Image (spheres, rainbow, N blue to C red):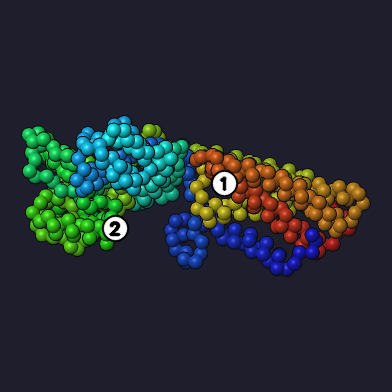
C-alpha cells in the first residue's frame, strides 16, 4: 500500500487534472466559453426546472384513438380485400373493440378465413353462420400501446428540439403519460400549441361528384372541413376518400418559404413517397387532390400535370409564424396519437434563484463544518482529507459537466450528502491507523495496515449505498433520478479520492518527512 508505482501516481494526478479542466467552464462566462478552442471542454452543468425556472407539462397519450384508428384501418383493408375477391358482405364496421361483418353467401366462410389469416394478424377471428368478429388480442394491444408511447416521446423530443429549447427533460410516466420539463421557457403557449397538434398529414382524392348535405356519402369516403370560402364564414365541406394515396410519413424535409409574397410551406418526399406521389398525380390529372392535416383540408388543388420531382408546396392563408410552425411539425413527424395536457406548471426564475441560494448555503455550511471537524480531529491527516474532499467536489462537478447532466434541487441535496459521506472512508482509515499505533506499530507499517485493513469495510459500505442509488434511479422518476445520479457519482469519486488520491498525498508526505511519530 505504501509503494505506489510512478505510473499510478501520474494516473491519479491526471484524473484530478482532467476533473479541474472539465469543472472550469462552469465558472466562465458564455462569451469566454465560446472563444475556447474546439478541443477544450466547454460543457457546463445544466440547471433543472426547479433551479432555472421554466415550464412543466404532463401529457397523456390518447390510446383509445390509436386502437380506433387501427380498427378503422382493418375495416378498410377487409373492404378492399373482399371487393377484390368479389365476395359480397353486409354490415362491415367497428363495434366496440371488434370489427364485424356478415357474408351474403355463408359457404364462402372458409375462403374468407384464409384471406383474414394474414390480413388480421394479431386479431382473434371468430365465425358463426357467416358472421365474422375480429377482436384485437390483448398482447397486440399492449405492444401497440408501448410502441405508440415510445414513438410519441421521440416525436415530442424532435418538436421541442426544433424550437431551440435547450436541455429539455422528456420522460415516460406510467403506461400512457409523458412528463416534459422545459428549463428557461417562460412562455409555454407556443410549446403547448406545437405539442397539442398531431400533425398527421395525408394526401387523398376529393370526390367531386358528391355534394355534402345533399347527396349520400358513399362507403370509403368521409366529409372533412376546409378553409372557409370567405373570411369569417363557415368552413367549406369536402367529401374526401378515406384511402390515403400518400402519407406524410414519407416526408424527408419541410421548410417555410414565400410564393407570390405569401407564406407557404415546401415539402420533399423520400424515394417511396416520391414514387407514390408521381403515380397518383400521373393517373389522376384534373382531379382535386386534398392535403389533409389533422382531419382538416388545408388545401385542395387541381392536379394540372403529373408532379414527378418528389416535392411540392402547401399554400393557404398562413401567417409567417403559422408557416414556420407547420414546417416544424412536418419535419419532426406526426404523433401516432393525440396528446392531452393534464397538468401545467410554470416556475419563475426568482424561485429558482432562491433554491440555488439555499442549496449553496447548505453545501457551503456543510463543507465548512466537515473541514473544521476533520482538521480538529486528525490534525495534518485531517488537512490531507480536506484536500481530498476538495478534489472530490471537483470530480463531481466535472462528471456532471461531462455527462451534460441536469442538476435539480434534489441533486444539490445529493451533493451536500456526498460531502459528508466523502470523509467517511478517511475516518475509517485514520481510525484504523490510530489503532495500529496503539498496538505499537511504527508510522510506515501503521499507515500500510490502516489502508489495507480499512479497504474491505470501505468497499462494502459504499457498495451498498451505490446499490441503493442504482435502485432509486431505475425505479424513481424526475427529481428522484437527479438525487440518485449525484449520489452515485459522489460515491464513486469519494472512493477514488479516499483510496487513491489521499493515499498518494499521505505517502508523498511520509517519504519526504520520514516522521518517527504520527500526529494523528
Query: What distance separates the C-alpha of mark 1 from that of mark 2?
Result: 37 Å
| Vertical position of residue 237 compared to residue 330: above or below | above
Of residues 275 and 259, the one drawn nearer to the viewer in this rendering: 275
Residue 352 in view of the camera: no
The circle drawn on residue 485 is 1
Q: Position of residue 172 (x, y in %)?
A: 45, 41
Looking at the figure, which quarter contains the N terminus? bottom right
Mark 2 burial class by Cα count in 10 Å: few <14, some 14-19, many 20+: some
Considering the numbered disc 2 on the image, is that residue within a helix, a strand or a loop?
A: strand
Q: Position of residue 70 (x, y in %)?
A: 31, 41
Q: Position of residue 108 (x, y in %)?
A: 26, 41
Residue 468 in view of the camera: yes
Left or right placement of residue 389 versus residue 269 in this view: right
Identify the residue at horizontal 25%, vertical 39% (top origin).
Answer: 107
Of residues 252 and 437, the one drawn nearer to the viewer in this rendering: 252
Q: Position of residue 168 (x, y in %)?
A: 42, 47
Q: Residue furthest top?
A: 96
Q: Which residue has dot 2 on it?
A: 252
Q: Nearer the viewer, mark 1 or mark 2?
A: 2
Quadrant of res 496: bottom right
Amino acid at each position: 500500500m505504501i509503494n505506489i508505482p510512478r505510473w499510478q501516481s501520474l494516473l491519479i494526478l491526471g484524473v484530478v487534472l482532467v476533473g479541474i479542466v472539465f469543472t472550469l467552464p462552469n465558472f466562465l462566462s458564455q462569451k469566454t466559453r465560446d472563444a475556447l478552442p474546439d478541443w477544450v471542454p466547454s460543457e457546463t452543468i445544466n440547471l433543472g426546472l426547479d433551479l432555472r425556472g421554466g415550464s412543466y407539462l404532463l401529457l397523456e397519450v390518447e390510446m383509445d384513438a390509436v386502437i380506433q384508428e387501427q380498427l378503422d384501418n382493418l375495416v378498410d383493408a377487409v373492404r378492399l380485400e373482399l371487393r377484390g375477391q368479389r365476395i359480397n358482405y353486409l354490415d362491415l364496421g367497428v363495434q366496440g373493440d371488434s370489427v364485424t361483418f356478415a357474408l351474403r353467401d355463408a359457404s364462402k366462410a372458409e375462403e374468407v378465413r384464409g384471406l383474414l389469416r394474414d390480413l388480421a394478424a394479431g386479431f382473434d377471428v371468430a365465425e358463426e353462420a357467416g358472421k365474422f368478429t375480429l377482436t384485437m388480442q390483448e398482447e397486440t394491444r399492449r405492444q401497440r400501446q408501448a410502441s405508440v408511447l415510445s414513438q410519441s416521446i421521440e416525436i415530442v423530443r424532435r418538436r421541442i428540439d426544433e424550437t431551440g429549447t435547450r436541455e429539455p427533460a422528456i420522460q415516460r410516466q406510467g403506461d400512457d403519460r409523458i412528463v416534459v420539463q422545459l428549463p428557461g421557457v417562460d412562455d409555454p403557449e407556443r410549446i403547448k400549441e406545437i405539442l397539442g397538434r398531431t400533425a398527421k398529414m395525408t394526401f387523398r382524392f376529393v370526390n367531386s361528384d358528391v355534394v355534402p348535405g345533399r347527396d349520400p356519402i358513399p362507403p370509403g369516403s368521409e366529409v372533412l372541413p376546409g378553409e372557409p370560402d370567405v373570411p369569417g364564414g363557415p368552413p367549406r365541406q369536402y367529401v374526401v376518400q378515406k384511402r390515403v394515396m400518400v402519407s406524410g410519413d414519407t416526408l424527408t424535409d419541410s421548410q417555410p418559404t414565400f410564393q407570390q409574397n405569401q407564406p407557404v410551406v415546401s415539402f420533399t418526399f423520400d424515394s417511396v413517397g416520391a414514387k407514390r406521389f408521381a403515380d397518383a398525380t400521373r393517373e389522376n390529372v384534373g382531379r382535386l387532390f386534398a392535403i389533409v392535416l389533422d382531419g382538416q383540408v388545408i388545401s385542395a388543388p387541381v392536379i394540372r400535370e403529373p408532379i414527378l420531382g418528389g416535392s411540392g408546396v402547401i399554400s393557404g392563408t398562413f401567417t409567417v409564424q403559422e408557416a414556420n410552425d407547420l414546417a416544424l411539425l412536418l419535419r419532426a413527424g406526426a404523433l401516432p396519437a393525440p396528446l392531452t395536457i393534464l397538468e401545467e406548471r410554470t416556475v419563475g426564475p426568482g424561485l429558482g434563484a432562491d433554491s440555488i441560494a439555499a442549496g449553496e448555503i447548505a453545501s457551503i455550511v456543510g463543507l465548512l463544518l466537515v473541514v473544521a471537524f476533520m482538521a480538529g480531529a486528525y490534525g495534518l491527516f485531517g488537512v490531507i482529507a480536506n484536500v481530498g474532499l476538495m478534489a472530490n467536489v471537483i470530480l463531481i462537478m466535472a462528471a456532471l459537466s461531462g455527462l451534460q447532466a441536469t442538476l435539480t434541487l434534489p441533486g444539490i441535496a445529493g451533493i451536500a450528502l456526498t460531502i459528508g459521506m466523502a470523509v467517511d472512508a478517511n475516518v475509517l482509515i485514520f481510525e484504523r491507523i490510530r489503532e495500529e499505533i496503539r498496538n505499537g506499530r511504527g508510522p510506515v507499517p501503521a499507515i500500510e495496515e490502516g489502508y489495507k485493513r480499512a479497504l474491505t469495510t470501505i468497499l462494502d459500505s459504499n457498495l451498498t449505498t451505490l446499490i441503493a442509488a442504482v435502485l432509486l434511479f431505475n425505479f424513481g422518476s424526475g427529481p428522484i433520478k437527479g438525487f440518485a445520479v449525484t449520489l452515485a457519482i459522489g460515491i464513486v469519486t469519494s472512493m477514488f479520492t479516499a483510496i487513491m488520491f489521499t493515499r498518494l498525498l499521505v505517502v508523498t508526505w511520509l517519504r519526504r518527512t520520514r516522521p518517527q511519530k504520527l500526529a494523528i
